[in-house]
């Protein structure tokens, strides 16, 4: 089994970002918000509602942008 080179991985990532920029942005925002939520809970901080709101907004945005790309 041949592993892909770093160049081909970078080209694939660039093509994905070029074709689906909003989807990548929503996924990144949701991932950062989820990671922040986990870290804040680990530190026993007061429950931060903004992390949950960003995750829900990113999820909805990702879903709607994927549907709009799929239907066109």
Image: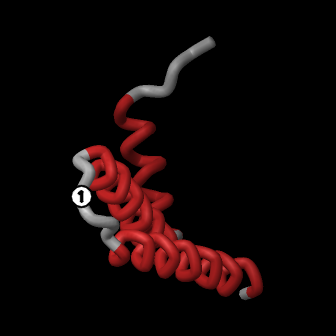
Asked if 9 appears above or below 24 in the picture, the reply is above
Asked if 42 appears above or below 62 in the picture, the reply is above
Residue at figure coordinates x 57%, y 15% from the top left: 2
Q: How is the image coloured?
A: secondary structure
Would residue 28 appear left or right of 19 to someone viewing this image? left
Residue at figure coordinates x 55%, y 73% from the top left: 59
Asked if 15 appears above or below 25 in the picture, the reply is above
User: Regarding mark 1 in the picture, which secondary structure is present there?
Assistant: loop
Quarter the N terminus occupies: top right
Q: Which of 58 and 17 is in front in this view?
A: 58
On the image, the x and y values in percent for residue 33 come to 36, 64
Place residue 64 in its image quadrant: bottom right
On the image, the x and y values in percent for residue 10 come to 37, 44
Residue at figure coordinates x 43%, y 79% from the top left: 53
On the image, the x and y values in percent for residue 48 come to 31, 70
Give the residue at mark 1. Answer: 45
Quarter the C terminus occupies: bottom right
Total count of labels: 1
Q: How crowded is mark 1: few (under 14 residues within 10 Å), some or many (20 or more)?
A: few
Asked if 68 appears above or below 31 in the picture, the reply is below
Residue at figure coordinates x 41%, y 47% from the top left: 11
Please, which residue is most extreme toward the right here? 71
Would residue 43 appear left or right of 35 to someone viewing this image? left
Place residue 71 in its image quadrant: bottom right
Q: Nearer the viewer, residue 16 or 54?
A: 54
Q: Nearer the viewer, residue 10 or 65?
A: 65
Place residue 51 in its image quadrant: bottom left
């Amino acid at each position: 089994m041949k592993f892909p080179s770093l160049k081909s991985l970078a080209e694939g990532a660039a093509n994905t970002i070029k074709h689906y920029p909003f989807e990548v942005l929503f996924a990144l925002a949701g991932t950062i918000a989820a990671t922040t939520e986990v870290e804040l809970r680990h530190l026993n901080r007061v429950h931060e509602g903004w992390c949950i709101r960003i995750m829900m907004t990113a999820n909805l945005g990702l879903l709607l942008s994927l549907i709009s790309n799929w239907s066109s």
